[in-house]
Image (cartoon, coloured by chain):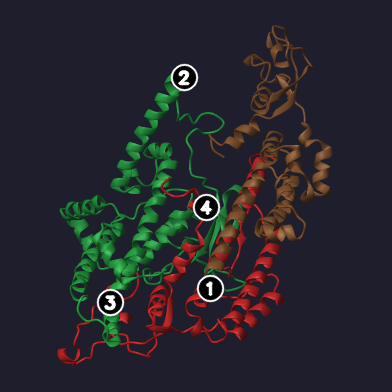
Amino acid sequence: MSLPWKLQETFSPEEIQFIVENEPIKIFPRFTTKQPVRGNQQSNSSVQTRWKLLTAKDEPLNNLVAIQTTEVALWIALLLKQQGKCSIVAPGWLRLAQLQKYIDYELKNTGRFSELPWNWLVVAQLLFSKAADDLHDPVHLLRGKVQDLREIRLSKIGQGLKHLNESHLQLDNLSLLEINELRPFVLGVMNKLKDIHNSISEDQEED
Amino acid sequence: MNIDIDDILADLDRDTTAVDSSLISQTHNDTTILGSDGAETDKLRHITNVSPVEDFETLITHWRNERMSPELLPFPHLLMQRTLRRVQEQVEHIEVLSMGYLDDTGGSADASDSRNATLLSKLPLLGMEADLERLRFVLRSFLRCRLAKIDKYNLYLRQFNEEGAAVSLDELLSRQELEYHERHFAILLKLLNNSILRHLPPELQAVDDNDGSVKMVEEPEWTRFVFVFVSGPDPKKEQVPDPRLLVSETTGQQFYPVTIQELQEEAELAIGGIYVMRYNVVRELILENKVQLI
Amino acid sequence: MSYYDIDDILADATKIPCRFNYNIPGLGYLEGNIGHDIKKNAKVELPLWLGRVLAIVGGDADPSSVGEDEALSFIELITPELLAPRVINAIKSGPATLDVRSINSHFYALAVKWATLFNDRELVEVLNYMLLERSQEIRNHASSIDLENLAQGRDPGTFMLTLDEFEKVIYRNSHESCKETKQWMVQK
């Protein structure tokens, strides 16, 4: 089979990660690639190889100045981080206090999800494992909060799924990974509800 | 993911071209053929200005839509042409760059300073190789997904042109896919004939009889539910406001009105919203890129 | 549902009780009397795919009779055990704990076919309720790791044995999806 059956109606978590890794994030580079404007060639003993990319912007990478923030694709940030060449600026929502606010919101509003970014779960997990020293708070505490947040949202989703129907559903503010996890269940049940209701719909007009 | 520069260099010695190289040379041919047509050349010249990153974003959207849609979507001919050409060029570019490194890795050794300098100078190469791999992954997955659907809808696609479809089969498929489809169909039919059909009475030999209570030819499940994100028109590409967009009187939010035909029900797709909808309800908006499958 | 859908084929092969409205020569083999006729009012179990056709096609296909009293179809379909009032009541009173598989392994598929044949709105409502209630239970099982189940003394195996074929697919796919997501979370 050209595509494994498992992937024919959904994405794998790794593919979701891949999609999220294309999103921009801020970094502090630890090195400079920007060429001095009127620099004489001798000052650069070795001529730097220029970045030339197909899937992400390469200008920022050819104009890095050490300790000046710049924005690059997440996968590049993680690659540089792995080589010890940058630190990553953790997004503002990835702090204990901020996560607690989201948790409070989730608990208070049973019918809505808090407006976390669509990639929050993946970004959090990636930074926990690959850039723990760049986070504002101790990683084990952050992990705990993210886990709490995930579980609260999952149980809220469970409540919401009692209202599955044969027509349609609005699920604003769910993140991509959460959607992907739910996908087989939600679509499977809704497709069956549709079949059940289709069995009489054709005669409806005659009634 | 552990990336080692030596692995990458070793990799370049092997042929890692996952994308069929004949595909690439074929696209070069396409270019020359198209080049003979005046209007097409202009179109092509105009579009070649699209930046690689923009193209990659479009490719990702195509890939995600294709993966989640029940039907086979039209092949993005020009986008794929540009992308495959860039892959080819980048492979050559990286090869040239890495040859330079192979030359000077022997000499300078211990001093941590020089090791650091080597790492820094190799970083772009490291990044470019990873970048190329990422693009190749999407291309591979996209083409594989399409092949799986071409297999699945083999008979349906055979009848495609007869059904009065808006797109012709050779626009829906790439030239290579068209050929694959033709040959796959021939092999399948031969297998069915040799193993079963020829032992049956002639009136029971049909594999495409759609007159019974259940059609023999499997069609895409048009009403299957899908997850969608409503992006609205791309502000970069469309200056004119979308006439189909309405503004909600209660919330002031912009939305697309849609009709769920089977239920004779109206629904609103608010911009920025995430919905579970029947595919046929959002199909047009998907083809116009106002809504994406997620 | 596609032409080659095995579950649909199996569902269609389920035997349904039918009553004949005519004496039909030579059909006795349907009730085991080879070489004999089938008598009017004889009760015979026929697979749904056959019963459906015979219940729709009239015994009097003579075009001259159009407009007269409605011709009786060859057979009358009798409500099968799996949709008997007893079962419907059991669904209404406690769908979540019901052993659907013991009723029929293709319960939903059959019930939908039945609802289509008789345009049975009430049955559709019952199925809708049943599916929603049971799917909560399926989701709970699918999203909890097996260890958690064992700790609470629940055996995932017995639960699985109460699901019909469609429910099993939902369970399996949901479970797979939750497991993969969890594994990804742990690895990161």
> Which residue does the numbered mark 3 point to in the structure image?
B122
The image shows residue C41 at horizontal and vertical percentages of 79, 17
Q: Nearer the viewer, mark 1 or mark 3?
A: 3
Colour in which the image shows chain C: brown
Which chain shows up in green? Answer: B
Rendered position, A79 above or below C29: below
Chain letter of disc 1?
A
State the separation of the CA atoms marked 2 and 1: 59 Å
What amino acid is at disc 4?
Tyr
Judged left or right of residue A188, residue B30 is left
Residue A26 placement: quadrant: bottom left
N-terminal of the pair, mark 3 or mark 4, is 3
Residue B290 placement: quadrant: bottom left
Q: Nearer the viewer, residue B97 or B267?
A: B97
Rendered position, A3 above or below A82: above
Q: Residues within 10 Å of mark 3 (few under 14, many from 20)?
A: some
N-terminal of the pair, mark 2 or mark 4, is 2
> Which residue does the numbered mark 4 point to in the structure image?
B279
> Which residue does the numbered mark 2 point to in the structure image?
B200
- SS type, badge 3: helix
Residue at 43% from the left image edge and 54% from the top image edge: B66
N-terminal of the pair, mark 3 or mark 2, is 3
**Of the numbered discs in the image, which one, if any, rests on residue A125?**
1
Q: Residues within 10 Å of mark 1 (few under 14, many from 20)?
A: many
Rendered position, B26 above or below A158: above
What amino acid is at disc 2?
Leu
